[in-house]
Image: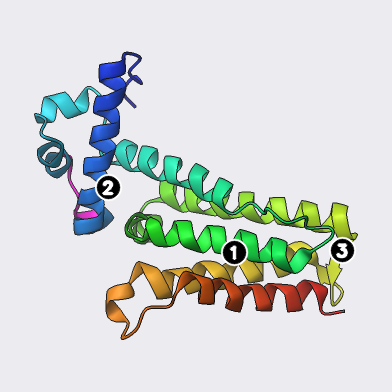
Amino acid sequence: MAAVPTTPKGKQTRQDILGAARRVFARDGYVAATMSSVATEAGLSLGGLYRYFSNKEDVFESLIGDIHEELYRASGAEHDFAENPYDALLDANRGYLDHYYSNRDVMRALIEAANVDARFRDFWFKMRDRHIDRFVEALREQHGIEKIDGLPARLAAEAAACMVEQSAYVWYAHEELRTETVPVEDAARLVTHAWHNMFFRG
């Protein structure tokens, strides 16, 4: 990967490149996107682009890395999980789905990339694990729950996370295929109902 710029101008150019790359990946998908397309979209020569990124993979990794950090922060909870688990789960799911919707073009490209490149398959898997680990730790520390129907709580959390992730992909990553839009608030309530029933059904 090329060196990260340190000057204000260099940093701004890098952000401009990532904005251009986002538009290219959204339009062309991961596989069909090229460095030439990113350079043209950014208004740079190909040589100028290579001063900031070594290849398409580096551009995409930087793009999704930034979005993942934002997604992780967005899926935190404002309500106290120990005192009000339903509302805390609703906060987390609403934040995740809202941010997913805002970045649905890149999330769609990420799934495509994960299916053709082990680098992004591993990134996607670690991204999921980070969310799941946070929830499982909170579940154990704040509610003493380590098993669901005799099975590890982490396994249940993985299943619940898959439901949210796949729902977001179906509802938002390919929204143009749907006959009607699923509002984020409705989506958050639906998946939170399932999460809460799985872990706190009494």
Determine if the magenta segment contains residue 120. Answer: no
Farthest top residue in view: 7
Give me the disc on residue 93: 1
Q: Nearer the viewer, mark 2 or mark 1?
A: 1
Q: Which residues are magenta?
A: 31-35
> How many residues crowd around disc 1 within 10 Å: few (fewer than 14), some, or many (20 or more)?
many
Q: Quadrant of residue 53?
A: top left
Question: Callout 1: helix, strand or loop?
Answer: helix
Farthest bottom residue in view: 179
Q: Residue tagged by mark 2?
A: 22
**For the residue marked with disc 1, what is the amino acid?**
Asn
Please say whether residue 3 is visible from this viewpoint.
yes
Q: Residue 150: image x %, image y %?
A: 87, 74
Structure colour scheme: rainbow
Q: Residue at x 30, y 38 (%)?
A: 59
Q: Residue at x 28, y 25 (%)?
A: 12
**For the residue marked with disc 3, what is the amino acid?**
Ile
Q: Nearer the viewer, residue 87 or 51?
A: 87
Q: Nearer the viewer, mark 3 or mark 1?
A: 1
Question: Callout 3: helix, strand or loop?
Answer: loop
Give me the disc on residue 108: none
* The N terminus, quarter of image: top left
Q: Residue tagged by mark 3?
A: 145
